[in-house]
Image: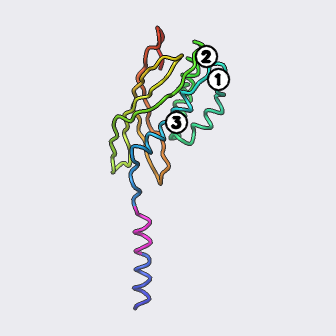
Amino acid sequence: MKKITFILLIGLITIVSGCKETQPLDEIEIKNFIMEYKSLIYNVNYKALPKYKELEEKLRPLISEDIFEQNKKNGIYMLPSSFASENNSNIKLEDIEVTGVTYSKGEKKYEVKYALFLIIDNVSYVKKGRMHLISKEKNILITYDWETPIDVGSKNFN
């Protein structure tokens, strides 16, 4: 009888520890993740533009598959590079401010509002956006990303 109780107890402990919930991400982890992701896209020297395939390889592990494919198809990841090339402009992501985080425990999803602080040809710009993230054992994936277009000089910058 003691063996059966012991085996059941071990089984119960294994099940409970397997169901242990991961800690929610804090704002610093979210900011660092967004900074890593956005730096790949927004740090552009028009004289040395990133190779599209290399950029895709770096971005792919950070984004859910369906969003990655959709954005790839629409050329979203190359918009800053295209702008830099067409306007002989350098673009640098200087900083990011996370302006709001809402965590949905049931969906294990984060809704993040942020502001990008960009330098384009030595002029500062702020670009606001929203992003949805999911986290599984400290692996973070982007499931939604949207930014407001801004005017740079007389040109629209998406």
Q: Quadrant of residue 126?
A: top left
In the rendered structure, which amino acid carries the disc numbered 2?
A: Ser
Give the labeled residue for mark 2. 85
Residue 93: % across, % down: 51, 28
Q: Residue at x 55, y 17 (%)?
A: 83
- In terms of secondary structure, where does tag 2 sit? helix
Q: Is residue 30 left or right of residue 87?
A: left
Mark 3 or mark 2, which is nearer the start of the sequence?
3
Q: Main secondary structure of the magenta part?
A: helix
Q: In this view, does 40 lie above or below 152?
A: below
Label 3 Cα neighbours within 10 Å, binned few <14 / some 14-19 / many ≥20: some
- Res. 49 mark: 1
- Whether pointer 2 and pointer 1 mark residues with C-beta atoms closer than 8 Å, the reply is yes
Quick one: 85 or 141, which is closer to the camera?
A: 85
Q: Residue furthest top?
A: 154
In the displayed structure, would residue 23 be above or below residue 3?
Answer: above
- Residue where numbered disc 3 is placed: 37
Please identify the residue farthest to the bottom as the structure is shown.
Answer: 1
Q: Is mark 1 on a helix, strand or loop?
A: loop
Name which residue type carries label 1: Leu
Local packing at callout 1 (Cα closer than 10 Å; few below 14, some 14-19, many 20+) is: some
Residue stretch in magenta: 12-20
Q: How crowded is mark 2: few (under 14 residues within 10 Å), some or many (20 or more)?
A: some
Mark 2 or mark 1, earlier in chain = 1
Give, as a three-letter code, the residue at label 3.
Tyr
Residue beneath the point at 64% across and 28% down:
52
Q: Residue 47: where, in percent of width, then height?
A: 66, 19
- Residue 146 shows which numbered tag? none
